[in-house]
Amino acid sequence: MTAEDAHAGADASSPAASTAAWQDPRTAHGPDAPAPPEPGAAGVVRRDALPHIAYAPAHPAPGEEGWLAGSGRNRTRWAVGPQGEGPARALGLRRVRALIDSHLEPDAAVGLHHHDSVEVYYVLAGTLQVVHERDGTREEALLQAGDVHVIAPGEAHAARAGAAGARFLALEEAGEAAAAT
């Protein structure tokens, strides 16, 4: 931990502990995005080499109201993605589209959205209020560290951090077509 991290009260896993520059999502996901990092010695990609993307709002959902519209800031480190599935393939992870270390600020929210594949949230710290729609019914749950939330393909879902923020891993499965190639 650097002196700056200590001053900010950050531990080694916090966004403040990284020396990498935080990217704007408009450039990090586009066709001019930097090439994904390749694993080095012993298959290691160091945290400062990973794409660091800061989303504000965390995940906008136009047309939704309140926190389901998305709000606050989400600082993410992409262990796999967002520039494609190349790093996952290099690591032999043929069924993984994205693996994201996500830090939501206090009360920040990932707006209501959906994917064409399975997504799993694993809460590392703080609390995460999740909402998802299953069979036309909207369900809610409050997750704490160690809890897992599984979202089936096509299910709309959203998440909001508690008063202390939340850190969680998001794992998104690659679709069948991607896995077959």
Image (tube, rainbow, N blue to C red):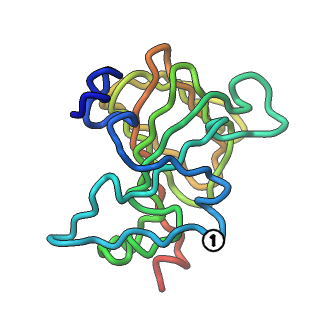
The percent coordinates of residue 174 (x first, y second) are 49, 67
Q: Is residue 92 left or right of residue 166?
A: left
Q: Is residue 137 above or below residue 99?
A: above
x 49%, y 51%: residue: 119
x 61%, y 36%: residue: 110
**Residue 91 in sight here:** yes
x 52%, y 77%: residue: 178
- Kind of residue at badge 1: Asp
Q: Residues within 10 Å of mark 1 (few under 14, many from 20)?
A: few
**Residue 134 in sight here:** no
Q: Is residue 116 left or right of residue 95?
A: right
Q: Assign the N terminus to one quadrant of the image.
A: top left
The percent coordinates of residue 122 (x first, y second) are 37, 39
Residue occupied by mark 1 = 32
Residue 71, quarter of the rendered image: top right
Q: Is residue 162 above or below residue 82?
A: above
Q: Is residue 127 left or right of residue 155?
A: left
Depth check: 41 or 92 in front?
41
Residue 70, quarter of the rendered image: top right
Q: Is residue 144 above or below residue 167?
A: above
The percent coordinates of residue 27 (x first, y second) are 64, 59
x 46%, y 59%: residue: 98
Q: Is residue 14 left or right of residue 75?
A: left
Depth check: 31 or 155 in front?
31
User: Which structural element holds mark 1?
Assistant: loop
Looking at the image, which residue sits at the far bottom? Answer: 181
Q: How many numbered callouts?
A: 1
Looking at the image, which residue sits at the far top? Answer: 163
Looking at the image, which residue sits at the far front? Answer: 3
The percent coordinates of residue 103 (x first, y second) are 45, 35
